[in-house]
Image: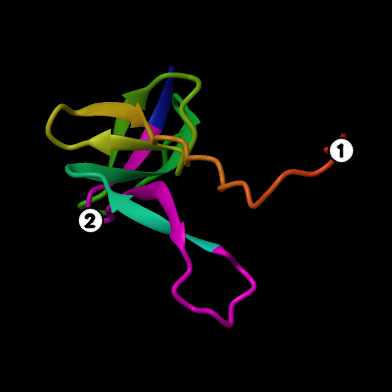
Amino acid sequence: MKKALISPNESVSYISAWIPNPDPTSSQQYVPEFTTIVDGARVAEVVANGSEFPIAPPLFWDDCADDVVADKWYYNTETMAIIQIPAAPPYPSTGTTGTQTV
């Protein structure tokens, strides 16, 4: 078991969609759309149990599973569970390569 350093004042967001870029001069065709996780607090650091260091409030330590990684998981302040942040959807395909016309 490990310990997660929770920062309740920092919200957590993730890329939930890719939308067409409104800037026609940009070379990037799509830009990310971020969604903030309701009741989500940042997992700022993960350490081995017994390796905790002194912190100041409102930060706090909480037990977590061995596979938890900082900034890839978040702490749900309502359920007090540590949950993995959803993966971003794949970047939209702008065409195909390697195809042949027959």
The numbered mark, 2 or 1, whose residue comes first in the sequence reads 2
Residue 97 picture location, percent across and down: 80, 44
Quadrant in which the N terminus appears: top left
Q: Residues within 10 Å of mark 2 (few under 14, many from 20)?
A: few
Residue 16 picture location, percent across and down: 38, 46
Quadrant housing residue 81: top left
Relative horizontal placement of residue 12, taking residue 89 as reference (left or right): left
The magenta stretch is: 4-29
Please tell me whether mark 2 sits on a helix, a strand or a loop. Answer: loop
Q: Could you tell me which residue is drawn at 33 percent across and 24 percent down?
A: 63
Q: Is residue 92 magenta?
A: no
Figure check: 68 above or below 27: above
- Res 100 label: 1
Identity of the residue furthest to the left in this view: 78
Q: Residues within 10 Å of mark 1 (few under 14, many from 20)?
A: few
Identity of the residue furthest to the front in this view: 102
Relative horizontal placement of residue 74, taking residue 30 as reference (left or right): left
Mark 2 highlights which residue?
9
